Image: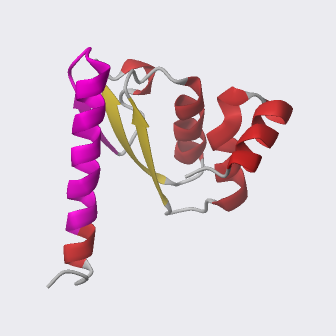
Amino acid sequence: NTDTSVLTCIANDFGFDNIFSRQLEGIAKENDLLICLSTSGNSSNIFNAIKYAKDHGIQIISLLGKDGGKCINMSDCEIVVPSNNTARIQEIHITIGHILCYIVEKKLNFLK
C-alpha cells in the first residue's frame, strides 16, 4: 500500500523505478515479508523492491504472470500465472490474495 504523497516524492527525487525499494529502506526489517504482484514480472520498481528485500533478509512472495519475467527465481515463493492475458492474470492474483488472507486468518484463529 502506498501513500500518494510518498509515491510522488520518491518518484520525483529517486525515480519511479525506486518507489517501492525506497519505502522498504524506511520501514522494512529483517524477517519481514514482502508480497509483490506483477503481471509481466518485468516491472523495474517491483524488481528493485525484490532485490532490496533479498539483500536485506526480507522474505518475499511474488505473484507473477506470463513467464515470470526478470523477477523469476528471485523470491522465496513464486506463483506464476502462465498467461499473456493481463485481466486473467490479475483475476488469479486477486483470488490467490484472498486465499492467502484466509489461510493467515485461519492460522491466527481469527476465523472460527
The residue drawn where x is 20% and y is 22% is: 82
Q: Residue furthest left?
A: 112
Prevailing secondary structure class for the magenta stretch in the rendered image: helix
Answer left or right for 110 relative to 1. left
Asked if residue 89 is positioned above or below residue 26 in the image, the reply reads above
The residue drawn where x is 19% and y is 80% is: 111
Q: Position of residue 65 (x, y in %)?
A: 30, 25
Q: Residue furthest top?
A: 84
Q: Quadrant of residue 93?
A: top left
**Magenta span has 93?**
yes
Q: Position of residue 18 (x, y in %)?
A: 69, 34
Q: Quadrant of residue 11?
A: top right
- Quadrant the C terminus occupies: bottom left
**Magenta span has 40?**
no
The residue drawn where x is 43% and y is 27% is: 71
Magenta stretch, residue numbers: 77-103
